[in-house]
Image (cartoon, rainbow, N blue to C red):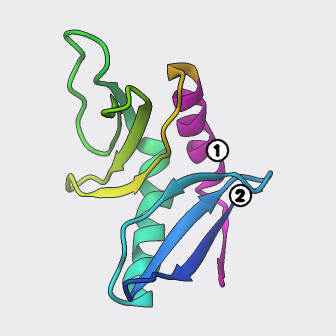
Amino acid sequence: MGKFVISAAKSGGFKFNLKAGNGEVIATSQVYKSLASCKKGIESVQKNAVAAATEDQTVEGFKTEKNPKFEIYQDKKKEYRFRLKAANGQIIATGEGYKELKSCKNGISSIKKNAPAAKIVQE
């Protein structure tokens, strides 16, 4: 069972990590100014992750999906990453860099599985 872990950000404010049942971080948030807005960000991930389509931007001529969606892309190091966009187009969660596309897609599957029922804890 996954969990959202809310923590204070070094720069002030709050952020969350979604952790899988094994404790691995599978998604991270931006920094929110208040605890209440951080919790709303978690609610947005819980709601949008399940409905989100996956748009693989690493494929030539990829199909543009409507929001909410997971966008898969490659960073400057050529690692695969994803970002989850809410229905309004805002980025609500991002993933780490993966060496293989399959691992990135597994991360997205894990979010879809873990986010909806994940407990929320505060450090």
- In which quadrant of the rendered view does residue 4 lie? bottom right
**Residue that lies at the very extreme toward the top in this rendered image:** 60
Q: Quadrant of residue 57?
A: top left
> Of discs 1 and 2, which sits in the foreground?
2
Labelled pair 1, 2 in contact (Cβ < 8 Å) = yes
Residue carrying label 2? 2
Magenta stretch: residue 122 in it? yes
* x and y, in percent, of residue 15 in the image: 46, 75
Under mark 1, the amino acid is Lys
Q: Is residue 103 left or right of residue 11?
A: right
Q: Is residue 118 above or below residue 15?
A: above
State the residue in front, 14 or 2.
14
Going 80% across and 51% down the picture, which residue do you hit? 22
Q: Is residue 63 magenta?
A: no
Tell me the quadrant of the picture where the C terminus can be found.
Answer: bottom right
For label 2, count other residues whose C-alpha is less than 10 Å away and answer few (under 14), some (14-19) or many (20+).
many
Magenta extent = 103-123
**Residue that appears at 60% across and 31% down:** 106
- Residue identifier under label 1: 113
